[in-house]
Image: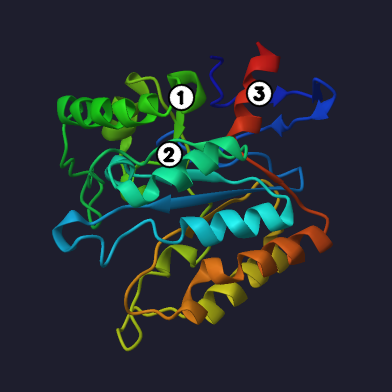
Amino acid sequence: MAALMCLALTACKQGGTPVVTLNPQTDDCGVVRNFNPDEKNVYLVFTAHYSTSDSGRFENFDGVVPVLDTLKAKGVKGSFFPTGVCFLQEKYQAPLRRIIDEGHYLSAHSMNHLMLCDEADPSKTLVGADSIATDFAQMEERLNALGLTKEQYCWMIPPYETYNKETADAMRNLGYHLLNPTGGFLTGMDWTSPGAKNYVSAKEILDNIWQYEKEHSMNGVILLIHAMNYPDRTDEDRVYTYLGEIIDTLKAKGYDFKTLNDVIAAEKTAQ
């Protein structure tokens, strides 16, 4: 598969269907943070983990069905990155099949949600290349069991959206292309609890999206929304509850929605 970093890849049509023009913007570790700031495409990405220590009370994939229902109602495709642990839960088997059957992109987020490096000091690597390889092999078993091939799920978001050059290189050496949510958004704070010092409400998160769009546009943005039901937040305080509103507003502003399936198609066309 053609390398993307520092390259502009153009794909006008595939089978008569418009694809995308890729001009990926990367961070210092070579991880894509925006696919093309010149095109009005938004990439909706949904991550999740299942916390086995509390039977999925705090972290879970319980938002996947309402997210899928909204995407279907709006005629929009998304990209999903649950951890491999989610694939082991019986209640998620039907939603995982829906993701594939309804044309969304499905990859993973590591098997066990590894913290690859210290959040406060990313230079401190916490997980070596061999351990990453072992974890990813388990993750791949889960994806392969759903009938997917590595070529179909080769784009992934690192666990916790946290990495350094060493761990990013380790993941790339396993055959993965890496993306991470575009910076400047508060959507990743939708796990915080009311009353806590770091709490950010759904309203604040939505206001942040529209302020960002006003100041920077949403061109090529990779927008993270957790498909999880955090226990201390009501349905009215979950960002995915407003997914339909987000989609409608962006459509009205002229944006289209793309997935990593479109990126892979563009890569193939550019070969």
Q: Earlier in the sequence, mark 3 or mark 1?
A: 1
Residue 265, numbered label:
3
Residue bearing mark 1: 148
Displayed quadrant of residue 195: bottom left
How far from the left and from the top, in percent, is residue 232? 33, 79
Q: Is residue 269 above or below residue 88?
A: above
The three-letter amino acid code for the residue at tag 1 is Leu
Please name the residue shown 25% across and 48% down the image.
122
Q: Is residue 107 above or below residue 118?
A: above
How far is the residue under mark 3 from the one under mark 1? 16 Å
Please name the residue shown 45% across and 45% down the image.
94
Q: Secondary structure at mark 3?
A: helix
Tell me the crowding category of disc 1: few under 14, some 14 to 19, or many 20 or more residues within 10 angstroms, Cα based. Answer: some
Left or right of 247 on screen, residue 168: left
Residue bearing mark 2: 28
Q: Is residue 155 above or below residue 47?
A: above
The three-letter amino acid code for the residue at tag 3 is Ala
Q: Nearer the viewer, mark 3 or mark 1?
A: 1
Q: Earlier in the sequence, mark 2 or mark 3?
A: 2
- 269 or 119: which is nearer to us? 269
Residue 137, numbered label:
none
Q: Secondary structure at mark 1?
A: loop
Q: Residue furthest bottom?
A: 195
The three-letter amino acid code for the residue at tag 2 is Asp
Is residue 162 in view? no
Q: Quadrant of the C terminus?
A: top right
How far is the residue under mark 2 from the one under mark 1? 31 Å
Displayed quadrant of residue 253: bottom right
How far from the left and from the top, in percent, is residue 96? 45, 42
Q: Earlier in the sequence, mark 2 or mark 1?
A: 2
